[in-house]
Image: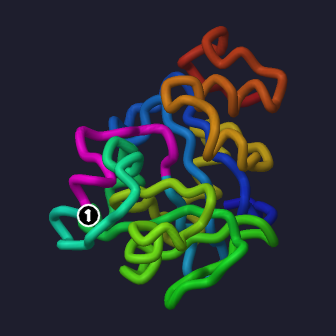
Amino acid sequence: MNSVTDLRNQFLIAMPGMEDPNFDRTVTLICQQNTEMGAFGVTINRPIDLTLGDLFNQLQIDFKDKSLLNIPVVIGGPVQPQQGFVLHDAENRWESTMPITDNLAITSSRDILVDIAAGKGPKRFLLALGCAGWAPGQLEDELQENTWLTCPAENHIIFDVPYHKRWQDAANLLGVDINLLSDVAGHA
């Protein structure tokens, strides 16, 4: 296993040959990484048939802003699929907010949902159910196997780009047309 620099606030872009269906054609934001705990991230481009309005109804959270009704929820990854994670701008903090950068954070406590419903939440956010996790050294091994491309994350891809374009647009940050890459990895 080779050491990899800190991947926090990096996109993991699944290579075309990704065999794990949980990550096929995904973009995952790495929120935390260290040698003791491994890595933790949230996939940002897999909307599911669940909206923020549905979630508020299930959690019995009253909401005023009807525009919230149709905001899609994404599958954040295969780990803890019932746990909600909110990626958001970092202007405010909530009970369990973890900073990723000076302008991006992730929160997993209910209080952020209550504030979003009341119109007091972050201006930009993405709600994910579940997350992605790697044991110490696992992600580094996957990178050595050419499973992922990596590049610095950009908030506009997380919050503004349509879900179906995020995989290609993230790869474009590297100057790569990911659709032209082979699905067979090799090593020189």
**Percent of width and height locating residue 18:** 47, 31
- Classify residue 94 as left or right of residue 65: right
Give 137 or 155, whichever is nearer the viewer.
155
- Classify residue 37 as left or right of residue 70: right
Q: Which residues are magenta?
A: 43-55
**Percent of width and height locating residue 58:** 16, 65
Give 9 or 107, whichever is nearer the viewer.
107
Residue at (48%, 38%) from the top-left corner? 45
Give 82 or 149, whichever is nearer the viewer.
82
What's under tag 1, amino acid-wise? Phe
**Percent of width and height locating residue 125:** 55, 57
**In the image, is residue 11 part of the stretch drawn in magenta?**
no
Q: Is residue 59 above or below residue 143?
A: below
Residue occupied by mark 1: 56
Q: Is residue 136 above or below residue 134?
A: below
SS of the residue under disc 1: helix
Q: Is residue 91 above or below residue 51?
A: below
Residue at (25%, 46%) from the top-left corner? 50
- Classify residue 90 as left or right of residue 159: right
